[in-house]
């Protein structure tokens, strides 16, 4: 990504989240064995998370020092939605989530088929038949290559047991 | 010697292994060439399918994918001005202007020949120097490995990212992810939160595929509708006169590539840029000015980035330290196949070393064949809309992650890392150091504790050891130098030292 003198929308929040995460990680690392010795299981995790805390502090300070976006909170939110999570990303992430939730029920083949079809139709916007054909071809290729050639056992669904 | 030769040629005479190496090279070229599918992504997704295979078969495929992937990026760089991989950035600078003049075929032909040439130099270096470095590395102490790990992560973090702090953060985050699970020394749970799933640790392949596959795909989703440019391709076999003319340059570039590739933390991308820079300065009177389709500027980076493949295998196989993100992924795969990359690899399993060298040679030959053929078909494939690629990448990443241990939970990890990786990329973090951290973290942890136990938990003695042994001293000095070069002192010293290199910055 390009560097610039002004912050990207959401960058400051991200830096704060990183710092919070690092602090939580450090606390968890401390919980492992505390400061009871130099060769305990917790020392290296503490070193790693400690480094993260320091780095996150530097990042936060530098980010805060850079020029922020102009406009109020609403404008900033608008830019964040446009530049970082546009509708397309949000939609695809939601689709992926549904795909994941559906996989244990429908099994890999059926859920992947649905996922591929809906995302082709949404992203590519061709006719229904073209998307369907493309889904069939790519799913067939994936199945042959991975199940038949590479012998990968694909997840089976609980709903359609024995079918897919 | 005869043993070495016999092992070297195993895959040359076994039709199935021959086929796998060829198929790997082919897949590497085409996947690596599709913009948005980087070599690392190609390698991490494709390799995940080999985990159930025999070691030899997997190694054959991996060698092919790596060789092909590094080369593949140059094709789209020339045809579409989109480097398929970072190592092809310099190629795009000269290759695309050539394509605009209608010389795309010639550019691809020359690139292929020079890539193969560079590849051979790198492999030769691997065969000659790896055994030497390996026996030297046997004298390395645990603290030296700790230092090597730190240096490796820092190099990758600082050379490619937006800022030092971001590189350090990404590396440390990787180390932290690598710590999750039961501590191998004391069996205490670390960051497990009482969950049985977490006790086994977070599989690094899930992290790899998530950070490189899904995260990159999400970034690519921003440029979904950038149209591809159609190219016509004519003469492909390069003029023999050209090959002869650029031989010296290719030789020097390959040397640069091998050395850069062998250094931990630097891979094909930096090798290519340095070689391009070298070509720019050593060519006094180019036929065509640099930046407008100069063949010297095409030959040097391409020879260098493929030479870096052989070079990168040197630290990977002898020290167990990956040279860059791709080798980090490959090292992960080697561990899964039960190999232990490190100084003992050549002692315990020399046949695998020579087998790998043989595969690389073979992959390089396949590169020449596939590189000079099928370019017209290729021009069609790279026009494949991202709208089709994106869903496919998601599904492939899911199968790839699941295939490792047949554990659906890993798919969730993978996608979680994908989303985190997306935000990291958007805000200027590199994900390479994270993967390096995940893989090197446990090694560094174990070596740190061994060194500390050796020093009887005496911090003074522990630190004294870092400067009182020659190998450790050299590494410590290097490490401190690296840290210092990132403080305000660094740019000042650099400006004094490299005052005459204004062109290096814009490459």
Image (cartoon, coloured by chain):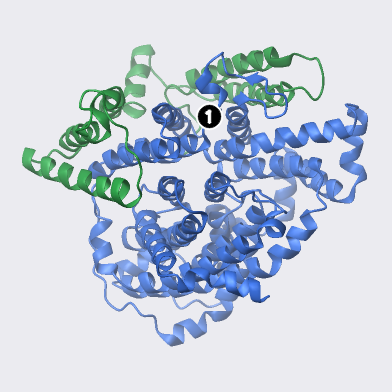
B95 vs B380, left or right, is right
Q: Nearer the viewer, residue B11 or B277?
A: B11
Quarter-of-image position of residue A43: top right
In the rendered image of this protein, which colour is used for chain B? Answer: blue
Q: Is residue A3 visible?
A: no
A108 vs B476, left or right, is left
Q: Position of residue B326 (x, y in %)?
A: 52, 50
Q: Chain of mark 1?
A: B
Crowd rating for badge 1 (residues with CA inside 10 Å; few <14, some 14–19, many 20+): some
- Screen quadrant of the N terminus of chain A: top left
Which residue lies at the image location 89% right of the left edge and 42% below the top edge?
B467
Marks counted in the figure total: 1
Quarter-of-image position of residue B152: top right
Q: Position of residue B106 (x, y in %)?
A: 35, 75
Query: Where B141 falls versus B103 (above or below)?
Result: above
* Residue ID for mark 1: B202
Which residue lies at the image location 22% right of the left edge and 34% below the top edge?
A164
Which residue lies at the image location 28% right of the left edge and 42% below the top edge?
B392
Q: Nearer the viewer, residue B308 or A147?
A: A147
Q: Position of residue B372 (x, y in %)?
A: 35, 74
Please tell me whether mark 1 sits on a helix, a strand or a loop.
loop
Query: Where A43 falls versus B373 (above or below)?
Result: above
Q: Position of residue B340 (x, y in %)?
A: 64, 48
Query: Where B318 falls versus B394 (above or below)?
Result: below
Q: Is residue B395 visible?
A: yes
Query: Where B391 falls versus B227 (above or below)?
Result: above
In the rendered image of this protein, which colour is used for chain A? Answer: green
A64 vs B420, left or right, is right
């Amino acid at each position: 990504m390009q560097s610039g003198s002004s912050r990207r929308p959401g960058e400051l929040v991200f830096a704060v989240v990183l710092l919070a995460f690092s602090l939580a990680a450090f606390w968890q690392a401390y919980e492992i064995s505390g400061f009871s010795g130099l060769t305990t299981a917790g020392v290296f995790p503490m070193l790693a998370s400690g480094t993260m805390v320091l780095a996150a502090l530097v990042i936060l300070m530098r980010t805060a020092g850079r020029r922020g976006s102009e406009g109020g909170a609403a404008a900033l939110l608008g830019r964040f939605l446009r530049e970082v999570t546009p509708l397309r990303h949000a939609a695809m992430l939601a689709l992926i989530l549904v795909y994941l939730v559906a996989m244990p029920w429908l099994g890999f083949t059926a859920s992947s088929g649905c996922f591929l079809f809906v995302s082709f139709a949404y992203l590519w916007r061709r006719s229904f038949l073209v998307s369907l054909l493309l889904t069939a071809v790519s799913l067939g290729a994936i199945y042959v290559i991975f199940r038949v050639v590479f012998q990968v056992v694909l997840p089976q669904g609980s709903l359609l047991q024995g079918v897919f | 010697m005869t043993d070495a030769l016999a092992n070297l040629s195993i895959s040359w005479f076994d039709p199935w292994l021959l086929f796998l190496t060829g198929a790997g090279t082919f897949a590497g070229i085409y996947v690596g060439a599709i913009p948005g599918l980087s070599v690392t992504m190609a390698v991490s997704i494709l390799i995940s399918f080999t985990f159930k295979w025999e070691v030899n078969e997997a190694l054959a495929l991996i060698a092919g994918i790596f060789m092909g992937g590094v080369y593949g990026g140059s094709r789209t760089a020339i045809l579409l001005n989109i480097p398929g991989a970072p190592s092809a950035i310099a190629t795009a600078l000269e290759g695309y202007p050539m394509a605009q003049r209608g010389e795309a075929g010639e550019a691809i032909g020359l690139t292929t020949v020079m890539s193969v040439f560079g590849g051979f130099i790198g492999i030769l270096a691997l065969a000659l120097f790896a055994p030497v470095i390996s026996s030297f590395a046997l004298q390395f102490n645990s603290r030296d490995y700790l230092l090597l790990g730190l240096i490796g992560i820092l190099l990758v973090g600082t050379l490619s990212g937006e800022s030092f702090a971001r590189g350090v953060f990404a590396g440390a985050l990787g180390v932290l992810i690598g710590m999750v699970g039961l501590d191998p020394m004391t069996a205490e749970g670390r960051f497990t939160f009482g969950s049985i799933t977490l006790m086994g640790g977070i599989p690094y392949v899930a992290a790899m595929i998530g950070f490189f596959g899904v995260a990159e795909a999400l970034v690519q989703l921003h440029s979904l509708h950038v149209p591809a440019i159609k190219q016509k391709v004519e003469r492909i076999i390069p003029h023999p006169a050209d090959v002869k003319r650029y031989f010296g340059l290719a030789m020097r570039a390959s040397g640069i590539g091998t050395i850069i590739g062998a250094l931990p933390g630097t891979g094909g991308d930096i090798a290519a840029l340095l070689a391009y820079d070298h070509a720019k300065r050593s060519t006094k009177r180019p036929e065509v000015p640099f930046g407008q389709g100069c063949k010297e500027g095409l030959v040097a980076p391409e020879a260098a980035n493929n030479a870096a493949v052989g070079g990168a295998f040197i630290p990977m196989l002898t020290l167990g330290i990956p040279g860059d993100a791709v080798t980090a992924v490959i090292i992960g795969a080697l561990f899964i196949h039960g190999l232990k990359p490190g100084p003992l690899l050549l002692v315990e399993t020399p046949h695998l070393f020579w087998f790998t060298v043989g595969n690389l040679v073979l992959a390089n030959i396949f590169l020449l064949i596939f590189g000079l053929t099928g370019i017209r078909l290729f021009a069609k494939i790279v026009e494949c809309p991202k709208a089709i690629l994106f869903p496919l990448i998601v599904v492939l990443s899911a199968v790839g992650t699941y295939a490792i241990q047949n554990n659906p939970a890993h798919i969730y990890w993978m996608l979680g890392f994908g989303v985190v990786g997306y935000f990291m990329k958007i805000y200027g973090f590199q994900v390479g150091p994270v993967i390096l951290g995940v893989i090197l973290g446990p090694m560094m942890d174990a070596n740190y504790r061994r060194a500390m136990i050796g020093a009887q938990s005496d911090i003074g003695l522990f630190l004294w050891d870092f400067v009182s042994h020659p190998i450790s001293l050299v590494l410590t000095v290097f490490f401190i130098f690296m840290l210092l070069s990132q403080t305000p002192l660094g740019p000042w010293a650099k400006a004094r030292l490299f005052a005459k290199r204004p062109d290096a910055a814009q490459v």
